Image (spheres, coloured by chain):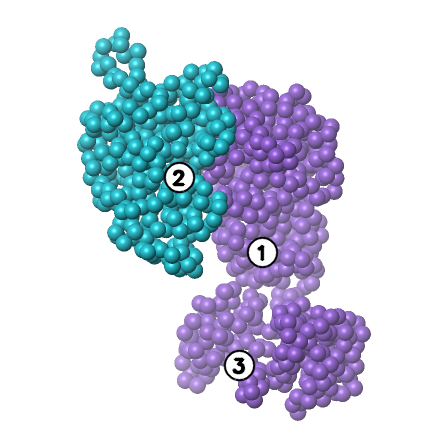
Chain colours: A purple, B cyan
Amino acid sequence: MARIGVFVCWCGSNIAKMVDVKKAAEIAGGFPNVVYSADYKYMCSDPGQNIVKDAIREHKLDRVVIGSCSPRLHEPTFQRCIGGADLNPYMVEMANLREHCSWVHDDREKATDKAIDLLRMAVAKVASDEPLYTTKLPLTKRALVIGGGIAGIQAALDIANAGYPVTLVERTPSIGGHMAQYDKTFPTLDCAACILTPKMVDCASNPNIQILSYSEVEDVSGFVGNFEVKIRKRARSVNFEKCTGCGICYSKCPVRKIPNEFDEGIGDRRAIYVPFPQAVPNVPVIDRENCRWFKEEKCRACEKLCPSQAIEYDQEDEILTEKIGAIVVATGFKTWDHSAIGEYGYGKYKDVITSLQFERLTNASGPTEGKVARPSDGKTPETVVFLSCVGSRDENHGYPYCSKVCCMYNAKQALLLKDKVHDANAYVFYMDIRANGKGYEEFVKRTIEDYGATYLRGRVSRIFESDGKLIVRGADTLAGVPVEIQADMVVLATAMEPQTDAKEMARKLGVSTDQHNWFTEAHPKLAPVEALTAGVYFAGACQYPRDIPDTVAQASGAASKVAVLFSKDEITSEPMIAYIQESSCAGCHLCASVCPFTAIDMVEVTDPRTKKPKMVARVNAGICHGCGTCAAACRSQSAKLRGFEDTQILAEIEALAEITSGF
Amino acid sequence: MKYAYFPGCSLHSTAKEYDCSTKAVCETIGVELEEIPDWNCCGASSAHSLSHKLSLALPARNLGIAEKMGLDVAVPCAACYNRMRAAEQELRGNTSERESINKILSAPFEGGISVKTLPEIIGAPDLAESIRENVKKPLSQLKAACYYGCLLVRPPKVMGFDDAEDPRSLDNIVSAIGVETVNWPYKVECCGASFALTKPSIVVKLTYDILRYAKAAGANCIVCACPLCQANLDTRQKDVEAKYGEKFNLPIFYFTELLALAMDLPVEDCLKRHMVATDEVLRAPITVGSGENADKR
């Protein structure tokens, strides 16, 4: 006979305000098999947990019901608690009296009745709880970092320095990401290259880091500690070992005038190129779509000129398969295409540029060597207008969210303009100035007061060309007047948005995305770097717009999560997962097709009764999340979920049905 | 192709030239217009500032009658189109509002028909052939700034017609009759029509900007599809010239007038109603080939 204890929590006033907790505990004390019941102000607190533990010992309880908050919040707490009193940790059931009851009702009497019903159901379920045991799984101590921007670089360095090997996969020919494009960084005006390139070099020289640039993750299978990752190493057409990085090939390549992606299209590159001089690895790539040899079977100039015979036109893509224990996703962001905005000319005005293009214009290693020159005629602009929130906080054209970093880089760019072109006029249109970071507010103030940038609160309704000028028309909502500025150049702070293939990457990794395709963390507050899929972590702006300090902090956070995982030699797997009763499994495959985590495989076994081979489903314990979809779908009740067996669910329903039939 | 025709108050008074040219062109290209019997004012522009219900009920009455006729509505005036389209959209989506409005209508509007603006109807791809066939005198002497004004394409979600920031429908229509159109930044700016009587100084400034940018872009006339825009730009031109000391002399045509002229339909009476004389720009071009005169046009 089961001996059940019921413990009802007040949750301060959260539950007690709407539920008569004393009455609920008292009535629950009379339920079948219940030998003890109590209530307490904070059951999750130390004294609260001691009440539970003491009662287990004193009343020889063998299972426990806690009437408190959601099991998502405190089930592990109470599992540990009863484990401390020598019960199997899975012999506890939670009745959610807070989220499912007190928070959502306003009639105390009815809420109390409902709380009692919820307790009755939990008591019925716990009576058939069975002890469950965790299992141990092996673990590969190698991390994969996807994306070689500052987030990926920081995460890779931290994991490597903790002593674990890292494979860093970068899609473009060089690591460095967006940060390598920037000129100075707010609010300290450190030169981006000066603080980034040493880290890039550290990555390259760290024996624990393997950089796979110009490569992409093709496929991810397996589970935490035991991922198998296929990586496509795209054909570089240059031999990595032979190339010395001398640069003769790209200085002599006859195919010019290809817009350089790294310069956001305002500078050129050749068909064989390194994206920027400080590239890591410093090994060129042949862009086969533009190379004359690949297009017309002519030229081969680079091959003839290369002093180390490193050019290999016949290279092919390679698929590498790596065993990986944990994955850090640092795939970053892209900027929104402002050509959707008709008011700003649908992208057809040459001197309406993006903030990223402006970065390249002010960058000493950019196409103008740091000279601020407008793209149309190369003249130094006298008046530049900076527009905030282009596609951000704009549900008509772009996204409802704030891109978070634009206020700060607007201020930085206005300051840099005034610094480089002393008598230039810098106008900044803004909605609100969001300068909430260390030294940020002071920085904006410096731009306005010391550098004389003119800040106008309002939006720009129209930009058009007239007599070689850009007419910028908007509103100054503080003065309450329309404003018209004759500008030479307009810089649009375009919204940050997820990578085009973020959804595809999410599918490969088995992680989820939000409505805009940003990756979704396991918990917005308490698990901000973890994906819901175990062993996958996020760093940087692939999750949401972030500035460099936040990105670096998060990358180190993700790296420490990996290090914690790798500090153990085995992985403990949760026992509340699905399993298949093979004797009745008909091998129909339905469970495998509905499983959202692809945790079910079909395997051949010998039927013990007929001695003939048959196909049955099998759950991979490392991948299964215990969602129960298979158990609900199975037509022969062969797919089952530990801790949520049919008998247990039916016991709950019956407990509730008895009450209902009493009305 | 047949439509319930809603001329609106302007086309029976100040904009008769829009009305007669519309009818002449539509008949020629095979668009049948049957005027909505006993139509009433659409309510622009005062009703919607005073009573939301009234602003729905006035157009709804016309829509109800048209629905009884079983025809989509053709609306030449941009302001009428704006109000009728707004009412159509709201009544279609909001059942309770529709029911309450229908209670006071003799012919209820159930959303079975929809409202179309004249540039949309005439600019439809399946009429292009018919227009091309009927052109007798291409108007290649004209270099037009097509002016859409603010109401025809806005708000885009309600009007659902053309591009709100860079509309092309009028440009496409008049290009088909040989008119060269200019790229200019003021296509969709407001002419200040609703201040025409209450605060003319605003109108003079706004019309000045429109005329100025049209001229700067090299246009010798402006083409529009709204009686209020036309009236403002045409009648205020003298005031503008006096105030800003700049001569414009830009005739303001309805696009239907140009279609009628190109099709050689009898619309001389229309042109007589213009304040800025039209005969100079319309003077037929000297036949190409006589080099010395070709420069003059």
The chain ID associated with circle 1 is A
If the image is split into quadrants, where does the C terminus of chain A sit? bottom right
**Mark linked to residue A520:** 1
Give the CA separation, mark 1 to mark 3.
Answer: 32 Å
Residue A30 in percent (x, y) is at: 68, 89
Q: Are marks 3 and 2 in contact (CB under 8 Å)?
A: no
Q: In this view, does B168 lie to the left or right of A168?
A: left
Give the CA separation, mark 3 to mark 2.
Answer: 66 Å
Q: What residue type is labelled 2?
A: Ala
Farthest residue toward the bottom?
A: A1
Give the CA separation, mark 1 to mark 2.
Answer: 47 Å
Of residue A347 and residue A319, the one placed in the foreground of this image is A347
Q: Which of marks 3 and 2 is in front?
A: 2
**Mark linked to residue A277:** none
Asked if one can make out residue A129 in the rendered structure from this viewpoint, the answer is no
Q: Is mark 3 on a helix, strand or loop?
A: helix
Asked where in the image residue A176 lies, by quadrant, the reply is top right
**Mark linked to residue A646:** 3
Residue drawn at (27%, 10%) of the image: B293
Residue A539 in percent (x, y) is at: 63, 50
Q: Do circles 1 and 3 both sit on a common chain? A: yes
